[in-house]
Amino acid sequence: MVGITELRAGGWRGVALAVGVCLASVSTARAQEEAAPAAPVDEGVEVEVEEAAPPGTPQVTPRYVVWRIKAGTGAGALAPRLERRLRREMTARLGGEVLSKAAQTGILLIRPELADCDGNLPCALEVGDALHIRFVVGGEAVAGKEASVTAWVIDLDTGKEVKRVQTRLEGEGEPAEQAAVAALADGLLQPPKLAEPKPAAVVAEDEGGGRPPVLGAAVLATSAVLGVLGVLTLGAGAGALGSAAMFQLVRQQTHTQRARVLSEGSLLAAGALVAVGLVLAGFAVPAAILGGVSMVLRP
């Protein structure tokens, strides 16, 4: 019995010893973690965090992608910050119409060559085609005394730049950068300027109210010419009739062959001239009517 009791006591001591070793190991590990220096945090690097859309938010097909704000003179750190701020600003205004940064990063796994695109033509068209996005936003930031940021919009449908906005950075830090990207978003998302209304006189002229139609004016001019020619021809015919009557009197008195020829020739000429004059007048009258009607019933 004594041996069994001692054996059991020895076993319990072994278990207690094992538990003590485990607890000591855990305490040592915690002490090492607490003693280890924390990883340095670069406060100048801003991490872009995308918030999930609230439940029930309708799905919208993205139309814009803020692809790249490239760094100009001295803007190596400024350009990425402005790019993130512009993406957030446009997303706040348009919601799901702006493609997320995660989706942009995902396309680079398939099309890695697009990573070199600065958001300008012609590679912006390849970006839009790869992402199935119509509007690609690019830009360039410049630091220094004349710090500024320029942004533009490339339209995939037209293949052209349709908007370009430039603004200065008034100061440094977050307020100045946020004010700059707000100005960029205002310009980039501003609807196209509508054409100013024309004066009433110009509108009336364009619609045919301020001037006669070309066809009506041409017909009236033609009728006037025909009328004048007709009158002149009829006058010449009347003169020829007078000459024929005179030659007829001479013929009756002299009974000469010459007088007979002149009388008959004048009579034939008078008849021809009168006929031509009547024909011209016949064309002039309906032409004048047609021209007048076309002017009255102008569109």
Image (tube, rainbow, N blue to C red):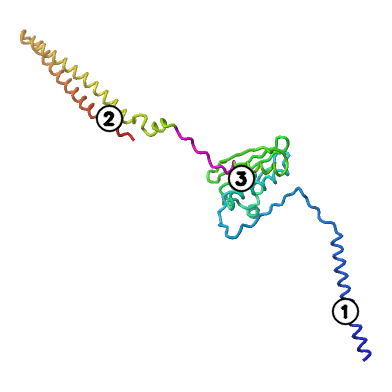
Q: Nearer the viewer, mark 1 or mark 3?
A: 1
Type of amino acid at the residue the image marks with label 2: Gly
Image location of residue 71, percent across then percent down: 70, 42
Viewed as shown, does residue 31 lie left or right of 83?
right
Residue nearest the viewer, comparing 265 with 288: 288
In the depicted structure, whether residue 29 falls above or below residue 149? below
Type of amino acid at the residue the image marks with label 1: Val
* Residue at image mark 1: 15
Viewed as shown, does residue 5 lie left or right of 243?
right
Image location of residue 217, percent across then percent down: 32, 28
* Residue at image mark 3: 137
* Residue at image mark 2: 292
Residue nearest the viewer, comparing 1 with 179: 179
In the depicted structure, whether residue 192 falls above or below residue 9? above
Residue nearest the viewer, comparing 195 with 234: 195
In the depicted structure, whether residue 191 falls above or below residue 105? above
Nearest to N terminus: mark 1 or mark 3 = 1
Image location of residue 144, percent across then percent down: 73, 37
Spatial distance from mark 2 to mark 3, Cα to Cα?
59 Å
Nearest to N terminus: mark 1 or mark 2 = 1
Q: Residues within 10 Å of mark 1 (few under 14, many from 20)?
A: few
Q: Quadrant of the N terminus?
A: bottom right
Does dot 2 land on a helix, a strand or a loop? helix
Q: Which residues are magenta?
A: 187-198
Q: Determine whether label 1 and label 3 are within 8 Å by CB.
A: no
Type of amino acid at the residue the image marks with label 3: Val
Image location of residue 145, percent across then percent down: 73, 35
